Amino acid sequence: MLSRVFTLFSSASCFGLGAAVLLAGHPAAASPVPAGTLIETTAEATYDEGGVARTVSSNTVQVRVDELLSVAAASLDAGPVPVRSGPAVLAFLVSNSGNGPEAVVLEVVTAVPGNAFDATRDSIAVDTNDNGVYDPGVDAVLPAPSTTATLPAGAAQRVFVIVTVPTGIGDGAQSALNLIARTTTGSGAPGTVFAGAGDNGADAMAGAGGGMATATGQMVGSASTVTLVKWASVSDPFGGSTAAPGATITYGISASVSGSAPVDTLVISDAIPAGTRYVPGSLNLDSAPLTDAVGDDPGEASPAGIAVTLGTVPGGTSRTVTFAVLIEE
């Protein structure tokens, strides 16, 4: 006698970041009974007949375990991903939490209610080299309809969603996208049966999540602007502040970066004004002296002008350059 049993397991739709990360091919330590497993039992009775001990066995009952369709998905980013206009990458973990091997179909929804901006989906890639970082040209892009390789029961796959962020987003603007994962065998209301579609000829049944799960990734606009302010102070040879021939003008230039994003390759430069000449050795960055020579520190100076290379400057910070000129006599 061959009968069928359906077992419904409860599973969460996402993993916490503190949970152990299981990648494809690395099953969990404990897992449900594999789909297609044949459970056989035979009852036995013993009795005494006229002083003779006898044993009798029942017929054997066979129960085949059906496949439970269950998938989980979770964002792997520690928080909102800072983004600017252009490409951005969000990381997710997709897990087969059922009891049979399953490939997972992935869908990205970028138009989420409440978004300050909507990114454009470019592609989905798997973490081919398993290093946790998206490597263009190395991590394989999933062709439409974006389906993972078959994941053993209890295994997981790290995937990257690559999007394009529109221009003109403001600093601090928030946006979300949803990654929807579905088992390839089918999805539907919990308890939906897919006859004969399970592993080893068993039926398949949608689990508590309906054979699908949704994970949300967050983005935050990261933009900055640079404000440049210049001032001058005059010191004449007689201890006053008259801009007479022979007086020294000390110029200060402050570069302030507002916003949350750093700016790169920032350089402050200024020309020596006509009627003056540069005072050698007067170049400073944040009150620290710089040499006038090229290449030995961030600054350089010549009779024509000064330049200070600041490189990458974090948002919310400022740097100040000072130098002096002498009014020609």
Image (cartoon, rainbow, N blue to C red):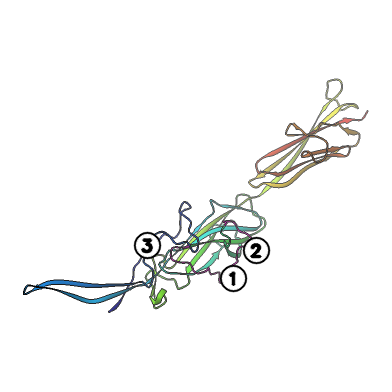
Specify the amino acid type for callout 3: Ser
Residue 6 coordinates in the image, percent (x, y): 33, 71
Q: Secondary structure at mark 3?
A: loop
Q: Secondary structure at mark 1?
A: loop
Q: Nearer the viewer, mark 1 or mark 2?
A: 2
**What's the distance in space between the residues labelled 1 and 3, CA to CA?**
31 Å
Q: Quadrant of the N terminus?
A: bottom left
Residue 153 coordinates in the image, percent (x, y): 43, 66
Q: Which residue corresponds to mark 3? A: 10
Q: Which residue corresponds to mark 2? A: 137
Residue drawn at (86%, 24%) of the image: 236
Q: Is residue 92 left or right of residue 203?
A: right
Q: Which residue corresponds to mark 1? A: 143
Is label 3 in contact with label 2 (beta carbons under 8 Å)?
no
Of the two numbered discs 1 and 2 on the same chain, state the one appearing first in sequence: 2
Of the two numbered discs 3 and 2 on the same chain, state the one appearing first in sequence: 3
Q: Is residue 27 left or right of residue 138?
A: left
Regarding residue 198, the answer to whether it shows in the image is no
Please state the total of marks drawn on the protein image: 3
Which residue is the extreme one toward the front?
Answer: 52
Residue drawn at (86%, 20%) of the image: 238
- Is residue 216 highlighted in magenta? no
Regarding residue 124, the answer to whether it shows in the image is yes
Q: Quadrant of the C terminus?
A: top right
Which residue is the extreme one toward the top?
Answer: 238
Residue drawn at (50%, 65%) of the image: 180
**What's the distance in space between the residues labelled 3 and 2, CA to CA?**
38 Å
Span of residues in magenta: 131-155
Specify the amino acid type for callout 1: Pro
